[in-house]
Image (cartoon, helix red, strand yellow):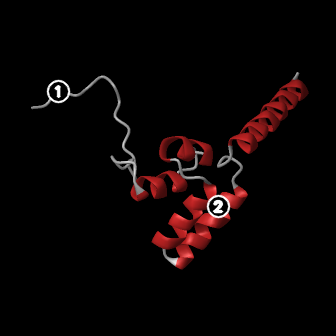
Amino acid sequence: MKKKSLIPQTRVKNPEPKKIDNNWIIWAAWADRITFEEIKEKTGKNESEVIKIMRKNLKTRSFKLWRKRVAKKSIKHRKKFKLERKKLREKINLSDINYI
């Protein structure tokens, strides 16, 4: 019988593909926590190239849903992500003051 590890294993619904190719780019584009800047650092593909790859490889409806998500989410761009986090921290700090 196999001994269980003391370190918990996280099971991911969509694990990261092994190679950095179009499959990895599509996976990374769908992942909310991976910014376009990180994709560019790893693959050399900028945002417009990623959009072209997504348009070519996804069904029309899937592509539209993805574009809608990316447009709403501020975390796909590093600058927007940092700004949103700053706003969130300020909001938390203000709510803490109100409880005192």
| Tally of marks | 2
* Rendered residue at 9%/32% (across/down): 1
- Which residue type does callout 2 highlight? Arg
Residue that sits furthest to the front in the current view? 44
Comparing 2 with 20, the one in front is 20
Given this view, does label 1 or label 2 mark the residue nearer the observer? 2
Q: Position of residue 100 (x, y in %)?
A: 88, 21
> Distance from label 1 to label 2 (Cα)?
42 Å
Q: Which mark is residue 57?
A: none
- The picture places residue 71, in percent across and down from the top left corner, at 71, 60
When asked about the image quadrant of residue 49, the answer is bottom right
Image height check: is 5 above or below 61? above
- Identify the amino acid type marked 1: Lys
Q: Is residue 75 left or right of residue 19?
A: right
Q: Which residue is mark 1?
A: 3
| Helix, strand or loop under label 2 | helix
* Residue appearing at x 79%, y 39% in the figure: 83
Q: Is residue 51 above or below residue 45?
A: below
Q: Residue at x 39, y 48 (%)?
A: 20
For disc 2, the marked residue is 69
Query: Tag 1, which secondary structure?
Result: loop
Of the two numbered discs 1 and 2 on the same chain, state the one appearing first in sequence.
1
